[in-house]
Image (spheres, helix red, strand yellow):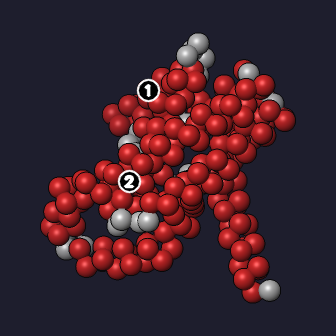
Amino acid sequence: MALKNLTKKIYDTTLNLASKPNALTWLFAISFIESSFFPIPPDIMIIPMVLATPKQAYKIAGVATLASVLGGYFGYFIGVYGFELIARPLLEFYGYMANFTKFENYYHEYGAWIVFGAGITPFPYKIITIASGAVHLNLIVFTIASILARGIRFYLIAYLLKRFGEPMKSFIEKNLNLLSILFLLLLIGGFAVIKWL
């Protein structure tokens, strides 16, 4: 119950920052830290900011994308440098080190898709940024997948809000998780069709 109250308080505070004169600076900060440890996604700020200033919709999306990708590097380096200190002892304690090695091999094969999927869907992106560093995923692959995923997610929200306004706000808030998963499935399906043609 205390955790739920804390999350609600963080959510309300983050939403409130969207109405401040320095909202873009706050959006940058929230987008950056959300990629490595903060629990509330930047969409919470993007929605009211775009509705309040539709002409700045793409600037808002750009700030969120840039900060999120930069924050992703922070998460990546937590994975690189924090793995031995924090993750390895826990994995060994619980007997999961062998499973992690299998996961690492799988991650190197499908890493771009994993990063892209987490970046565009509601899956906590911070987990993937840290995992990418822990398995030393190629940094160029990580960067490209992050830019594409975060860019598509934030620019799509900005476009829809700019184009359709307030009615789209309710639709996005109710269906963001479903829409992002559906988009990812369509994208993967499209690549599968191209591969088999």
Where the C terminus falls, by quadrant?
A: bottom right
Q: Residue at x 47, y 30 (%)?
A: 29
Residue 9: mark: 1
Q: Position of residue 67 (x, y in %)?
A: 52, 38
Where the N terminus falls, by quadrant?
A: top left
Q: What amino acid is at disc 1?
A: Lys
Q: Is residue 140 left or right of residue 132?
A: right
Query: In the structure shown, which secondary structural element does the residue marked by tag 1 occupy?
Result: helix
Q: Nearer the viewer, residue 180 or 21?
A: 21
Q: Position of residue 167 (x, y in %)?
A: 81, 33
Q: Position of residue 74 (x, y in %)?
A: 38, 45
Q: Nearer the viewer, residue 4 or 29?
A: 29
Query: In the structure shown, which secondary structural element does the residue marked by tag 2 occupy?
Result: helix
Q: Residue at x 48, y 32 (%)?
A: 30
Q: Is residue 120 visible?
A: no
Q: What amino acid is at disc 2?
A: Tyr
**Distance Cα–Cα, label 2 vs label 1:** 28 Å
Q: Is residue 26 visible?
A: yes
Is 197 drawn above or below residue 109 in the view shown? below
Q: Toward which corner of the image does residue 79 lie, by quadrant? A: bottom left
Labels 2 & 1 near each other (Cβ < 8 A): no
The residue pinned by badge 2 equals: 76
Q: Is residue 92 left or right of residue 141?
A: left
Q: Residue at x 19, y 74 (%)?
A: 95
Instruction: Decide: few, some or many residues near mark 1? Use Cα within 10 Å; few <14, some 14-19, many ≥20.
Output: few
Q: Is residue 75 left or right of residue 143?
A: left
Q: Residue at x 53, y 66 (%)?
A: 112
